[in-house]
Image: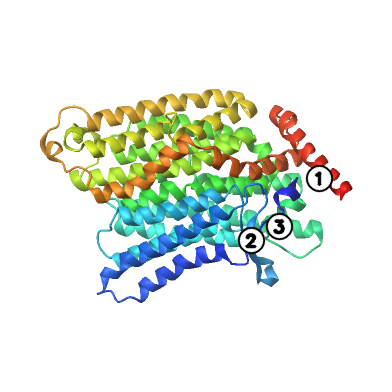
């Protein structure tokens, strides 16, 4: 079954679509760098056009994707550093597809929805470099190339927080950079160890190719488990998982609005995506071995994040802690090692990016009007700004997980997967759904209801231009809540192949894998054999 997931027979476009989607934002950043600083009227249009063009290519990728193929599609594979076995290998499957599309959609909205305070030239250049790095992370199929892009995204976000953030921005940026660099060091050691041990066991050339390493499974069980621990630490910092989460509230609170949107919608998903691609797929036995610990950390994140969010006085910091809780649901679904759980985790990744990105845009709009984010100073805004209150209500209810909005399907599937593969962790995780309703509804009541005093009574309502920025996110919140089926069906072949890959290379005896996944796999294999005989 590992061969099924690794199938390179998947569609490979003659047009290097993935390469263009990575190079185009880099080119836009270079163009901004060439424009004289006194022509500042060009910086924002260049960033908007470049990011929108990249987003359009991502949507085109979605329309051309073969939903029935579990393997990698639109692949690019060229030798880069021959002596080290490093290749420019890129591809997309049902697991990475919607993360690439989310990246393509959210960046133009973030650029359009919030302007920087000073030095637009550097700001928009860093935003485009961040977009290019994110595209590279979600499409790289070579370990060292993935690591390079994984590191590239740190630099733009460091400068976005440190130069365009708020009060304690330098402290928050430094803390963010040091935490993530610390985790990345573990990942680099793990990657090198895996490549060297693979070469020693197989006697072939050294390689960092993800598909080759995952298919061969040549490393010993003990070594694989240690390597998984190295990867797990790196991705735990990036997610972040409790207790390695403390950089996130500071980074979110001090970051500019667009920086918070990108951090929540895209960058936090680098860690959860890493667990799928470089945990379950690359080291399946080790992932199954570590699943109880990861499930425990996920459940702790769900409950701790919700409780911490309830105690916050700063509205933006509350939304930041809500991310810790939502990301716990992703980890819970992923390490349930079930089709439902992993699919639910992927849905939460995408939908969390949409809803939390929208929440940060709305908090930014409130701050621009009131110059404060303290909940105690934001009461009664609904009377003066009914449209803003209405939009906030829809987005907040989506984040709570109200049926009919996009937050519900992912959390439901994550919990279903957990009940099948890790029942007691699923039982505890249900409390997170209740607590989410508590802290978000309470925050909404304190900010928009009550008696309006002072500036709250005369606050300007949402402008048409601001509503148009929010409109695509609102449309996605409603559409993906009512019609999650097409997205689930697109993800499912790759997810089923991944679950079968983990089951094949591990000794897990989870009921859903034994009773559901393996018969499906065997039936598919039998059909393939019959087809070959008839052929």
Which residue corresponds to mark 1?
A: 528
Choose between 351 and 533: the one closer to the eye: 533
Label 3 sits on a secondary structure element that is loop
Instruction: Count numbered badges in the picture.
Output: 3
Q: Is residue 363 above or below residue 35?
A: above
Q: Position of residue 402 (x, y in %)?
A: 42, 29
* Residue 245 visible (yes or no): no
Q: Position of residue 76 (x, y in %)?
A: 63, 64
Density class for disc 3 (Cα within 10 Å; few <14, some 14-19, many ≥20) is some
Disc 2 + disc 1, Cβ < 8 Å: no
- Asked if marks 3 and 2 touch (Cβ < 8 Å), the reply is yes
Q: Taking 335 as reference, is 122 left or right? A: left
From where the camera sits, is residue 101 visible?
yes
Q: Residues within 10 Å of mark 2 (few under 14, many from 20)?
A: many
Q: Is residue 397 above or below residue 7?
A: above
**Percent of width and height locating residue 104:** 46, 55
Give the residue at x 10% y 36%. 454
Residue for badge 2: 75
């Amino acid at each position: 079954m590992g061969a099924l997931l690794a199938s390179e027979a998947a569609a490979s476009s003659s047009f290097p679509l993935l390469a263009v989607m990575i190079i185009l934002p880099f080119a836009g950043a270079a163009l901004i760098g060439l424009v004289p600083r006194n022509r500042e009227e060009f910086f924002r249009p260049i960033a908007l056009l470049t990011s929108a063009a990249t987003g359009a290519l991502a949507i085109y990728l979605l329309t051309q994707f073969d939903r029935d193929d579990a393997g990698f599609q639109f692949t690019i594979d060229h030798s880069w550093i021959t002596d080290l076995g490093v290749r420019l290998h890129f591809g997309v499957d049902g697991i990475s597809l919607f993360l690439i599309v989310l990246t393509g959609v959210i960046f133009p909205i973030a650029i359009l929805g919030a302007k920087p305070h000073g030095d637009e030239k550097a700001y928009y250049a860093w935003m485009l470099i961040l977009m290019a790095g994110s595209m590279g992370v979600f499409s790289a199929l070579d370990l060292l190339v993935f690591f390079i892009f994984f590191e590239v995204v740190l630099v733009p976000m460091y400068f976005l927080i440190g130069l365009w953030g708020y009060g304690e921005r330098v402290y928050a940026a430094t803390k963010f950079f040091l935490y993530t660099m610390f985790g990345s060091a573990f990942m680099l050691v793990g990657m090198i160890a895996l490549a060297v041990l693979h070469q020693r066991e197989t006697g072939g050339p050294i390689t960092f190719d993800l598909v080759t390493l995952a298919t061969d499974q040549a490393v010993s069980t003990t070594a694989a488990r240690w390597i998984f621990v190295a990867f797990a630490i790196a991705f735990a910092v990036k997610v972040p998982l409790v207790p390695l989460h403390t950089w996130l509230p500071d980074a979110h609170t001090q970051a500019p609005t667009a920086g918070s949107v990108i951090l929540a919608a895209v960058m936090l998903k680098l860690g959860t995506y890493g667990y799928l691609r470089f945990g379950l797929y690359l080291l399946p036995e080790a992932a199954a071995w570590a699943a109880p610990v990861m499930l425990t950390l996920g459940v702790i994140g769900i409950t701790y994040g919700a409780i911490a969010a309830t105690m916050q006085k700063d509205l933006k910091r509350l939304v930041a802690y809500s991310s810790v809780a939502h990301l716990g649901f992703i980890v819970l679904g992923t390490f349930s090692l079930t089709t439902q759980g992993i699919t639910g985790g992927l849905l939460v990744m995408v939908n969390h990016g949409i809803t939390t990105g929208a929440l940060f845009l709305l908090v930014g709009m409130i701050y621009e009007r009131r110059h404060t984010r303290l909940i105690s100073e934001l009461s009664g805004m609904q009377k003066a700004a009914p449209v803003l209150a209405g939009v906030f209500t829809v987005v907040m209810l989506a984040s709570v997980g109200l049926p009919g909005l996009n937050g519900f399907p992912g959390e439901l599937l994550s919990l279903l997967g957990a009940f099948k593969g890790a029942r007691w962790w699923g039982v505890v995780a249900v409390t997170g759904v209740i607590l989410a309703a508590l802290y978000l509804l309470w925050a909404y009541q304190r900010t928009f209801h009550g008696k309006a005093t002072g500036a709250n009574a005369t606050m300007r309502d949402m402008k048409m231009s601001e509503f148009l920025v929010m409109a695509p996110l609102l449309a996605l919140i409603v559409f993906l809540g009512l019609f999650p089926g097409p997205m689930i069906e697109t993800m499912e072949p790759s997810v089923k192949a991944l679950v079968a890959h983990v089951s094949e290379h591990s000794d897990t005896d989870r009921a859903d894998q034994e009773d559901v996944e393996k018969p499906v796999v065997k039936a598919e294999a039998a059909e393939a054999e019959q087809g070959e005989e008839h052929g």
